Amino acid sequence: MSFELPQLPYAYDALEPYIDARTMEIHHSKHHAGYTNNLNNAIAGTDFEGKSIEDILKGCKDNPAVRNNGGGFWNHSLFWNIMGPNSGGQPSGALADAINAAFGSFDGFKETFSKAAATRFGSGWAWLCVKDGGTVDVCSTANQDNPLMDLGCGGTPILGLDVWEHAYYLNYQNRRPDYINAFFHIINWDAVSANYEAAK
Ligand code: MN
C-alpha cells in the first residue's frame, strides 16, 4: 500500500482572494504530489512500509528523506482540510473554551499564532496543537517537521499554517504578515473542531 495525494475538498480558486488559484494548483499538484511520491519512494523496502503516517512521523527523525517527505505529506493533508470558502470567524464549543483557557481570548490566540507564523525563520509551519487533557498550545516547527515528531510543543496538530514561500510568494511576495492575516478569513473552524474532538 502506498500513500496517495488527497484530493482538495474544494476548487483551486475557492480560496480567492485570500489564496490565489495558481498558488493552490502548484502547491497541491506539484509540491504536495512531490512529497507524496518521495515519501512512497523513501519508505519502500524499509520498516516504515505498511505503517500509518502518524506512526511513521513518530519514528522518522533520524531518516531525513522520510522526515521531510512524511512531514510534507501529513502537513499538507491537514492544511487543505482546515481551510475552506465561506469560512473564517471564530470557533465555538469545546474548542473555543480550550482556546480561551490557553490564550485568554480568541484575539489572544490570533496574536500568539500569528507571531509564531511570522517569526519562523525560513521555511516551516505554525501549529495549534492539542495536548494531554484537551488543552491547546501554539508552536512552530522548521521545514516539514511536525509536533508528532516530538518537536515544537509535542502535541497533536489540529490547525496548521504553511509559511514556506511557495505557499504565498506569487500573491504576497515578501509580505508574509499579510498572508497570515488572510489565512484567518479562510480557516474552517468546523473542521478544526472535528480535529480537536478526535485528538483530545
Ligand atoms: Mn507547502
Image: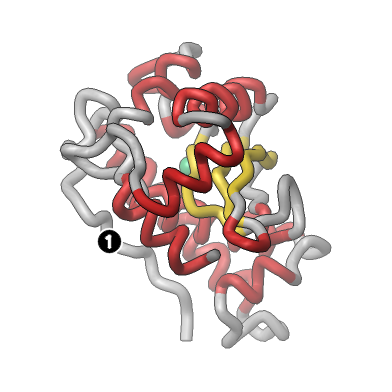
Q: In the orientation shown, which residue stands out farthest toward the right?
A: 62
Question: Residue drawn 58% across and 59% down?
Answer: 134
Question: Residue drawn 71% across and 68% down?
Answer: 58
Closer to the camera, 19 or 107? 107
Which residue is the site of mark 1? 7
With respect to residue 5, does 152 lie above or below?
A: above
With respect to residue 10, does 58 lie above or below?
A: below
Which residue type carries mark 1?
A: Gln
Taking 135 as reference, is 85 left or right?
left
Q: Which part of the image, by quadrant, shows the C terminus?
A: bottom right
Q: Position of residue 118 (x, y in %)?
A: 58, 21
Taking 5 as reference, is 200 left or right?
right
Q: Dividing the picture into quarters, in which one does residue 45 lie?
A: bottom right
What is the total number of numbered labels drawn onto the structure image? 1
Closer to the camera, 175 or 130? 130
> Which type of secondary structure does the marked residue at label 1 adopt?
loop
Question: Residue drawn 72% across and 48% down?
Answer: 153
Q: Position of residue 191 (x, y in %)?
A: 33, 54
Please say whether residue 108 is visible from this viewpoint. yes
Q: Dividing the picture into quarters, in which one does residue 171 lie?
A: top left
With respect to residue 28, does 184 lie above or below?
A: above
Please say whether residue 71 is visible from this viewpoint. no
Q: Dividing the picture into quarters, in which one does residue 19 lie?
A: top left
Q: Position of residue 78 (x, y in %)?
A: 44, 55
Question: Residue drawn 47% across and 86% down?
Answer: 1
Taking 38 as reference, is 21 left or right?
left
Render colour scheme: secondary structure
Disc 1: CA contacts within 10 A as few (<14), some (14-19) or many (>=20): few
